[in-house]
Amino acid sequence: MPLERVIAAAQAETQVTRYYDSSYVKLAYPGGDPPPDRGVCSDVIVRAFRAGGIDLQREVHEDMARHFAAYPHIWGLRAPDPNIDHRRVANLMAFFTRKGKAVPITDHPEDYRPGDIVAWDLGGGLLHMGIVVDLRASPNGPYSLVHNIGAGARLEDVLFDWRIIGHYRYF
């Protein structure tokens, strides 16, 4: 089942992606990816979804090509770029929302299920995202998330560490 593959792939990222690297990289299309030992927070999501049969690089690029005005224009681009668009949190948020995958943001841990994507505002214009997995840091605590905030992919109990600005359920 795709959801189980997505969750397993997200957890596996913690053993592979060791570095945070936001460098612009020319990628193959479709199916392109930065080197597996590096990436940004969105690369955790992209890699996990690929394991579930969804190529967000292609999906986001094709949707942006058809509906470019529906996406944020904070990077000064005049056209979609398949090398970077799927690696930007704001674009993934727009994509998931456009596809009807947004679910309510709450302060109830039980509302966040394995496979859900959570986006945060870190302040100062910085956005971040992670994926909920089926492990908990404590028996009654919320599910943990896999994310890459600067030191490689990590499995951590960070659901409410920052202000949640997006909650998405694709599967």
Image (cartoon, rainbow, N blue to C red):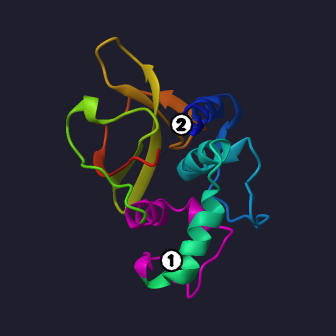
Residue 167: x, y in percent?
34, 49
Question: Crowding at label 1, few (<14), some or many (≥20) Cα neighbours within 10 Å?
Answer: few
Q: Nearer the viewer, mark 1 or mark 2?
A: 2
Q: For residue 78: magenta? A: yes
Residue 38: x, y in percent?
69, 45
Query: Three-letter amino acid code at disc 2?
Result: Leu
Quadrant of the snapshot with the N terminus = top right
Q: CA distance from mark 1 to mark 2?
A: 32 Å
The disc placed on residue 75 is 1
Q: Residue furthest front?
A: 1
Under circle 2, the secondary element is helix
Q: Is residue 2 above or below residue 26?
A: above
Residue depicted at 65% across the width and 51% down the height: 21
Residue toward you, 108 or 62: 62
- Return the disc, 1 or 2, that comes first in the chain's sequence: 2
Residue 148: x, y in percent?
54, 42
Q: Is residue 142 above or below residue 170?
A: above
Query: Three-letter amino acid code at disc 1?
Result: Trp
The disc placed on residue 3 is 2
The disc placed on residue 153 is none
Magenta region, residue range = 70-98
Residue depicted at 43% across the width and 32% down the height: 114
Picture mark count: 2
Q: Residue furthest right?
A: 28
Q: Is residue 104 left or right of residue 88?
A: left
Q: Is residue 114 left or right of residue 36?
A: left
Residue depicted at 43% across the width and 59% down the height: 96
Q: Is residue 163 above or below residue 113?
A: below
